[in-house]
């Protein structure tokens, strides 16, 4: 049965207004075209829907019943199409995002503000998680996109570079490592305050220490950078954190030193392999890129100009 949406709209309009000419004007179609569309619908159904009268048209009994059924369906369909058009033009939509805490508290607020400035009705539904959990959420379709480190096994995930930062050591100003190179050998002899084990920072440190035959002496672990910074403030140990952690700006009395050699972390946008971004997600990724500072996302270590990020 070959029935078009245009023919259904034409019939319902004529049935409602009892006039081909008025219905044609409201639908912005010519009257002859509207007449052809209604006739084709009647032919497809094998049923007379309208009686043509000298001064208009009158629905038949079958036509009246069909019009009553079609009107709410066509309204719902038009609403669904409006929503889809709004999503496509980025007027509406929600992005389900999973992000590591350092990005969620650092880069993301500025990116969301930029997104809302460009597309006021777009929304971001955020869940903070460590790297392993972010990747698992994207795999399970609990998040459309994730922001974390590049997956080691990325066969089912696609990753696009977002920015790079590096690992820095955070300590009180009077600490013995506050001067001289902060090598991994020197760090290995200290009690360390580290991120949780399923994080990109912990993985990077573990690999770097293992490559030199060194062991990590972990005093405490935490998910959030603020917790480790406050522990460093009390002298519990040296916190090793990503340089983009916004919480570093809240502790100006602490010394932040780059490591020797530099340990760089690549932060990427993750999605399921073979999946395209929704228009809303595409807009969010564009806002993220637009919010990255000109220095590539890194924050200069406090009180230590000699350890500015290398280029």
Image (cartoon, rainbow, N blue to C red):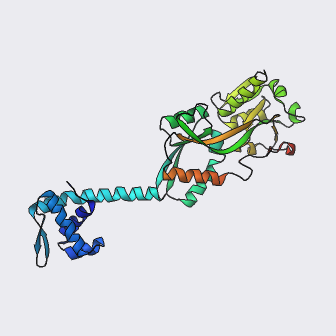
Q: Is residue 143 left or right of residue 52?
A: right
Residue 214 rendering spot, x and y as whole percentages:
78, 22
Between 179 and 153, the residue placed more toward the observer is: 153
What is the quadrant of residue 29 in the picture? bottom left
Instruction: Please give the count of numbered marks on the rendered protein.
Output: 0
Residue at the spot 65% in from the left edge and 53% down from the top edge: 291
Q: Is residue 152 left or right of residue 166?
A: left
Between 230 and 277, the residue placed more toward the observer is: 277
Residue 36 in view in this figure: yes
Residue 307 rendering spot, x and y as whole percentages:
84, 42
Residue at the spot 49% in from the left edge and 53% down from the top edge: 279
Residue 136 rendering spot, x and y as whole percentages:
53, 33
Residue at the spot 75% in from the left edge and 33% down from the top edge: 240
Vertical relation: 278 (above or below) 120: above
What is the quadrant of residue 133 in the picture? top right
Residue at the spot 56% in from the left edge and 51% down from the top edge: 284
Between 251 and 152, the residue placed more toward the observer is: 152
């Amino acid at each position: 049965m070959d029935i078009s949406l245009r023919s259904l709209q034409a019939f319902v309009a004529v049935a409602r207004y009892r006039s081909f000419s008025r219905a044609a004007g409201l639908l912005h179609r010519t009257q002859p075209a509207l007449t052809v569309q209604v006739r084709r619908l009647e032919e497809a159904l094998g049923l007379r829907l309208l009686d043509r009268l000298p001064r208009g048209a009158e629905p038949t009994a079958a036509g009246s019943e069909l019009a009553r059924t079609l009107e709410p369906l066509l309204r719902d369909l038009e609403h669904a199409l409006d929503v889809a058009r709004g999503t496509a033009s980025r007027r509406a939509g929600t992005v389900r995002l999973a992000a590591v805490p350092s990005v969620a508290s650092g880069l993301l607020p500025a990116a969301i503000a930029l997104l809302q400035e460009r597309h006021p009705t777009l929304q971001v539904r955020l869940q903070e998680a460590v790297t392993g959990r972010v990747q698992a959420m994207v795999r399970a379709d609990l998040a459309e996109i994730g922001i974390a480190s590049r997956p080691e096994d990325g066969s089912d995930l696609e990753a696009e570079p977002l920015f790079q930062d590096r690992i820095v050591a955070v300590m009180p100003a009077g600490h013995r490592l506050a001067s001289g190179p902060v090598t991994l050998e020197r760090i290995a002899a200290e009690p360390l305050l580290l991120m949780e084990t399923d994080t990109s920072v912990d993985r990077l440190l573990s690999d770097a220490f293992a490559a030199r035959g060194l062991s990590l002496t972990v005093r405490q672990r935490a998910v959030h950078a603020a917790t480790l910074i406050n522990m460093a403030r009390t002298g519990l140990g040296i916190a090793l954190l990503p340089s983009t952690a916004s919480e570093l700006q809240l502790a100006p009395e602490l010394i932040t030193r780059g490591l020797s050699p530099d340990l760089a972390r690549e932060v990427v946008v993750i999605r399921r392999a073979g999946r395209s971004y929704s228009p809303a997600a595409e807009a969010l990724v564009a806002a993220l890129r637009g919010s990255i500072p000109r220095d590539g996302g890194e924050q200069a270590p406090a009180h230590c100009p000699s350890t500015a990020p290398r280029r």
